[in-house]
Image: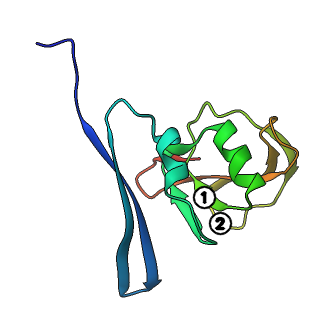
Amino acid sequence: MSKVSSGIKLHIRVVVASSNSVFLEKMIPSTGNIADSDAVNHIFDDDALYVMDRGYAHKTKMGGWLQRNIQFLVRVRKTFTTETLKSYTTTLPNVVKNELVSIRTREEPLRYIEFVDSEGTSFH
């Protein structure tokens, strides 16, 4: 077994034009040792809503996105710390939290939603 690991990642921007029209718009390959949060800024360049997984959720990066007025929806880890500014009443049974929060590194508030899917998996 080797102590050296290798791998590649593909960071993509997909355009959803309609419910039956989806296409790849941009693709950035990286080596496995490049953090997703470092590669993500090379994907942004227009007024779209970006949907990302946990590897892209870094408070410093989010602060930069907020400064650039980038709209984003990002899944965060359970350990992601926030300060609750306001709690909203949830109307759906699978929504555990619906809050306006501060990530403590920025003044701009963010929306934080936690829900559980039909298999019991929690998403933040």
What's the residue at 68%, 61% (across, down)?
70
Amino acid type, callout 1:
Leu
Residue 40 x/y as whole percent? 51, 49
What's the residue at 73%, 45% (across, down)?
63
The reply, left or right, for residue 60 in relation to residue 17 is right
- Foreground residue, 93 or 51? 51
What's the residue at 65%, 66% (across, down)?
92
What's the residue at 23%, 34% (across, down)?
7
Residue 111 x/y as whole percent? 74, 55
- Foreground residue, 34 or 81? 34
Q: Secondary structure at mark 2?
A: loop
Q: Which residue is mark 1?
A: 73
The reply, left or right, for residue 41 in relation to residue 65 is left
Q: Which residue is mark 2?
A: 92
Residue 60 x/y as whole percent? 68, 37
Amino acid type, callout 2:
Leu
